[in-house]
Amino acid sequence: MTRVGIAGIGFMGWIHYLAYGRLGGVEVAAICTRDERKRRGDWTMIRGNFGPPGEQVDTSAMACYETLEQLIADPEIDLVDICLPPHLHASASIAALEGGKHVFCEKPIALTMAECDAMVEAARRHDRLLMIGHVLPFFPEYAQVLRWFREETYGAVRGGTFRRVISDPLWIDGFYDPARVGGPLVDLHIHDAHFIRLLFGMPKQLTSSGRMRGEVVESCHTLFRFDNPDHVVHAECGVIDQQGRPFTHGFEITFERATVAYDFAVEGDQGVTSKPLTVFPADGGVERPSLESGDEITPFEQEIAEVLRSIESGSSSDILGGDLARDALVLCHGQTESVRSGQPWSS
């Protein structure tokens, strides 16, 4: 039985709590929050942009701590699940690793490369696992693409275009502050940067064109270059001022023997799948594969199952590992530098 302590009972802490409740072999044994109401189980004020709202939770069987230090000192806790704001990820993760705990930390891994390096080194030095919550590969359409890639169902991957755009997130305090949240690239595009890194490896160079908003990129298009000249990859990310379309993401990915495409958006308060996952095989025709069923919590359930498998095996996940998450942040900072300078950036 893996005993988990969740640090931070906000929206993601609530979603993770729900996901743990669906899995065997794991128990949320502790929580850590400064909010006394939440320690008493009143989570009804929690709201997010998907999933159910918070509820009254029975915390009587949990250890309910006010500080992270108290949680880390609990000898019964095996894994600390960090759902704190991004600017606290590094300090909280390092403290937990130094306290002998495995760490599962929400994305982004951190806000600076120095913080990333310190986290990865702390995991190595203390022989603990550091895993980062890049949940995108567990969403059905992306999970299916990853399976096709790994099994070479349609041959080698050759290229792709990725899109992730939101309306201005007025509800996120400090969204455009590079020292608190990091802006659209670090908070949003990092999902696609991570997925691109999974499929194509680390780009050797990128060129981004876009506009800045203070110290962060507000919107940009990026062309990635790889050692393999067959890999032609482009991504769009950013914020629009029109609040009627709060979220959209999708992709078109080319393999040797097929192209696969997907597009989803929230328009008003309705989710609209303008193109379900579709395969265009090289020999003609159109195929729409059936996907695994589930709800909005299912990808997080599968992500956490991957965390638990890693702990059981003693080896880091090849999807959620800290090194891969670090590379994703490197790419986001590289794009910022390219937009700012008007020049290509090399890794």
Image: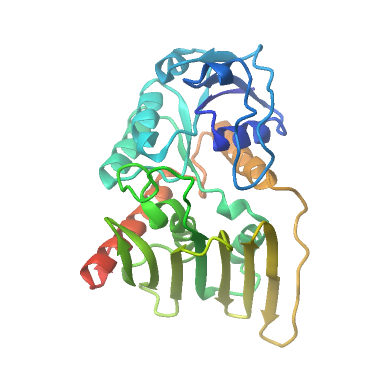
Percent x, y of residue 255: 58, 76
Q: Quadrant of the C terminus?
A: bottom left
Q: Residue at x 55, y 73 (%)?
A: 156
Q: Nearer the viewer, residue 219 or 84?
A: 219
Q: Relative to 71, is 111 above or below?
A: below
Q: Relative to 59, is 321 above or below?
A: below
Q: Nearer the viewer, residue 63 or 286?
A: 63
Q: Relative to 190, is 342 above or below?
A: below
Lateral position of residue 336 relative to residue 231, left or right: left
Q: Residue at x 45, y 65 (%)?
A: 237
Q: Residue at x 76, y 55 (%)?
A: 292
Lateral position of residue 28 relative to residue 294, left or right: left
Percent x, y of residue 239: 45, 62
The colour scheme applied to this rendered structure is rainbow
Percent x, y of residue 41: 63, 19
Image quadrant in which you'd find residue 260: bottom right
Q: Quadrant of the N terminus?
A: top right
Q: How many marks?
A: 0
Residue furthest out toward the bottom: 284
Lateral position of residue 231 relative to residue 269, left or right: left
Percent x, y of residue 341: 21, 68
Image quadrant in which you'd find residue 98: top left
Q: Nearer the viewer, residue 86 or 242?
A: 242
Image quadrant in which you'd find residue 221: bottom left
